[in-house]
Amino acid sequence: MKKYTVLLDSSVNDLSVGVALNGEIVASTSYYAWQKQSEYMVSELDKLLKDNEIVRDEIKDIMVTIGPASYTGVRIALTIAKVMAFALGVPLYPVSSLRVLKDSNKASICLINARSGRSYIGVYEGNKVLLEDRIMDNKDVLNYINENKEYAVCGDTKYLGIDGYKADVIKEMLSLKSASIAAKDSSSVNPVYLKGK
């Protein structure tokens, strides 16, 4: 029997859903759905599974982004993932919402608008974490970017007046699987909400 990985993200503006088999994406969809993710995510996942003739017994694990990001956005994918993991009795792999925004070909400054003149920021190179996820004032973020011009700037960064690299979130999420640790108890996985100073 084939064993698939389900991948879910609703942490920022887009809704992203995918299924993978043996480390390869079988099917995925990702599109702008700000404040509509809760309406569409279950039906998009259901459609992907049906279109690829995947039944529930073939799902072996689930990956989901857990923040930092919008409180409501993070909860949508995480709630769906937790319910599925519990119902199917499969492992749940939580990953950073920032980390899936990286450019896998170079060191990446990954950003999400934290509002009030601040950003969620994490910096990565491959599977290495160069700067742990945190909140930073936008002035300090821009200084950091200027000091590290060789790094890719990733995410929906228009709020900073920058065109950021737009990652394939599902592909990046899957690339982190080997470096991720399954939750001991999927029901205890909580969203990550970073607080500023």
Image (spheres, rainbow, N blue to C red):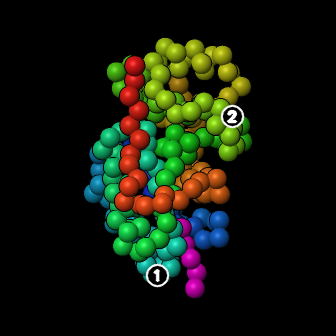
Q: Quadrant of residue 150?
A: top right
Q: Position of residue 126 (x, y in %)?
A: 69, 43
Residue at point 56%, 42% (across, down): 99
Q: Is residue 9 visible?
A: yes
User: Which span of residues is magenta-colored?
Assistant: 1-6
Provide the residue designation for mark 2: 107
Please tell me which residue lies in front, 168 or 57. Answer: 57
Mark 1 to mark 2 CA distance (whole Å): 38 Å
Q: Is residue 157 visible?
A: no
- Magenta span includes 153: no
Residue at point 38%, 55% (across, down): 188
Q: Position of residue 175 (x, y in %)?
A: 64, 54
Q: Is residue 149 above or below residue 35?
A: above
Mark 1 vs mark 2: give the one in front: 1
The disc labelled 2 sits on which kind of residue?
Ala
Residue at the bottom extreme?
1
Q: Where is the N terminus found, in terms of image quarters? A: bottom right
Q: Are marks 1 and 2 in contact (CB under 8 Å)?
A: no
Q: For residue 57, which numbered disc appears in the image?
A: 1
Q: Position of residue 84 (x, y in %)?
A: 38, 68
How crowded pointer 1 is (Cα within 10 Å; few <14, some 14-19, many 20+) is rated as: few
Numbered disc 2: secondary structure = loop
Please tell me which residue lies in front, 56 or 181. Answer: 181
Residue at point 69%, 34% (across, down): 107
